Image (cartoon, coloured by chain):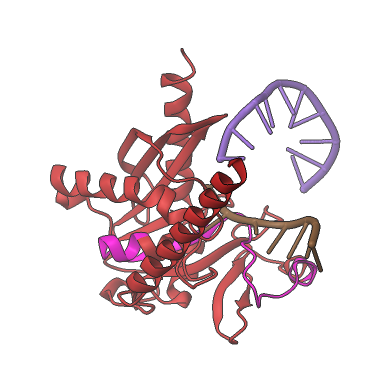
Chain colours: A red, B brown, C purple
Amino acid sequence: MAAALLEGECKNRELLLREWERQQMELKEQMIDHDTEDWQSNEVFEGLERIGGVDLSYIKGDEVNACASLVVLSYPDLKVIYEECQMVCLTAPYIPGFLAFRETPFLEEALRRLQHKDPSLLPQVIFADGNGILHHREFGVACHLGVLTDLPCVGVAKNLLHVSGLEEKDSLKEKAKDLQKEGNAFSLIGSSGKVLGMALKSCEKSTKPIYVSVGHRISLDTALRLTHSCCKYRVPEPIRQADIRSREYIRKNVNVS
DNA sequence: GCGACAG
DNA sequence: ATCTTGTCGC
């Protein structure tokens, strides 16, 4: 009896993952992996004025509540010109390869709220905390959010997601040691030989690289240059500010219980 | 078979 | 992701 229930649970989970994979492949048809905006083609991103950053912060041992944040920074100043934090109820667990199903709904909602409140503040490109095509099926959270909003989107992960076909972890660690100067980077190549992303030494101080990949409506080259130009510290400022603000929001509004 | 695995 | 202060170093 219990065994049958467990078996059923596993089967349901398996079916859910297959369904999620199907959705990823379907949305992927709309993904654009090259530059589509005028500001992307010039060396200093002339015409780019607003960059968005999104993030979710979690609560220790709370599987339901979290805080979703959206910030918009001016460019090239990188000053916060819009900020919103919103408590949300999580519906999906974290499963590597399916992060978008856990976070994207709330990020999309935040962008739609901004669109409604003040369209003139909508970002021209979004930085997402996680990967773009550096992903098992080449459709990570940055692609997912990009396609749903149809905004240019860059994926930046602080840790490497192990995708089959990628080089061994040790080999990549060796290459990371060779990154001498900020801006130095090396390609992350998938099994097909395709470049899925870049490991970037984002600022002079950092030892550990960040992993940049295409989300939507941007080329890898542009994504890398833009990411580098947004780094005062290791993590690009839009993501860093979203992270700081959502964590602070939780600290002030949840911990007081 | 076991371990690894964005947030 | 989160639990966590100080501390060693440029």
Residue, far bottom: A193
Residue A179 in the magenta stretch? The answer is no
Where, quadrant-wise, is the N terminus of chain A in this rendering? top right
- Placement of A116 over or under A222, stated as above or below: above
A3 or A189: nearer the eye? A3
> Measured from the top left, where is residue A174 in percent x and y?
79, 69
Q: Where is residue A149 in the image (x, y as percent from the top left)?
A: 26, 60
Q: Is residue A63 shown to the viewer in this render?
A: yes
Residue A190 image position (x, y, % from top left): 60, 79
Looking at the image, is C4 positioned above or below residue A257? below
Residue A44 against residue B7 in the figure, above or below: below
Question: Does A162 appear in magenta?
Answer: yes
Query: Foreground residue, A148 or A10?
Result: A10
Give the residues drawn in magenta, as a range: A145-174
- Considering every residue shown, the one lying at the far front of the view is A1
Q: Position of residue A173 (x, y in %)?
A: 76, 65
Q: Is residue C1 above or below residue A239?
A: above
